[in-house]
Image: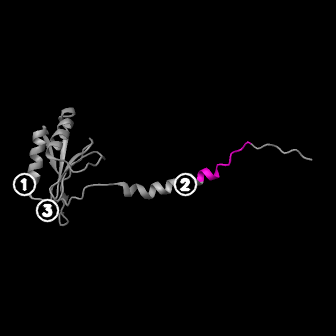
Amino acid sequence: MAKRKLSSDINVVPYIDVMLVLLIIFMVTAPLLVQGIQVDLPKTDAQSMTSDKEEIVLSVDERGQLFLSVGDKQAEALTDEDVVRNVGAIVRNNPEQMILIHGDARVPYERVAHAMALLQQAGAHKVGFVTQPREDAP
């Protein structure tokens, strides 16, 4: 009788299969996890600006609700006091931080001006408006 030799090799093929299935699941679901506030931006002929800092965006949706987004973090609807408190904390840490306003084209201008006043109340000195380029622009 021949003596069997013990094998100490680990079969990694099942682990590779599981890893590939998980990779496919993450690749399919990752784009679905991106959330945002639907804002129909007004169209203008203005030049685009670029910034290497983290974006702080105050969005005003078509119903006039305010949303504050810091970087990739999306927020829920905020009250005026919450906007002033959150932006105030950001501006105290970085007084030169640019705050961008996404104002829906269908929202009354009064509501966008109110959002700008809240930013001023919070101490923000650098405020920019985000628009989309016109289709007929050169």
Would residue 72 be found to the left or right of residue 44 on screen? right
Q: Quadrant of residue 65?
A: bottom left
**Residue type, mark 1 in image:** Glu
Q: Position of residue 82 (x, y in %)?
A: 18, 43
Check the image and tell me how it is coloured: one colour
Determine whether 54 is above or below 61 in the image.
Answer: above
Q: Are marks 1 and 3 in contact (CB under 8 Å)?
A: no
Q: How many marks?
A: 3
Would residue 68 be found to the left or right of residue 117 on screen? right
Residue count near mark 1 (Cα–Cα under 10 Å), binned few <14, some 14–19, many ≥20: few
Q: Any mark on residue 2, and which?
A: none
For residue 94: magenta? Answer: no
Q: Residue at x 8, y 51 (%)?
A: 113
**Residue type, mark 2 in image:** Leu
Quadrant of the drawing holding the C terminus: bottom left
Q: Position of residue 104 (x, y in %)?
A: 16, 58
**Residue furthest left as drawn:** 110
The residue under label 2 is 20
User: Helix, strand, or loop for circle 1?
Assistant: helix
The residue under label 1 is 110
Q: Real-space Cα distance between discs 2 and 3? A: 45 Å
User: Helix, strand, or loop for circle 2?
Assistant: helix
Would residue 52 be found to the left or right of residue 105 on screen? right
The residue under label 3 is 106
Residue range (magenta): 8-16
**Residue type, mark 3 in image:** Arg
User: Helix, strand, or loop for circle 3?
Assistant: loop
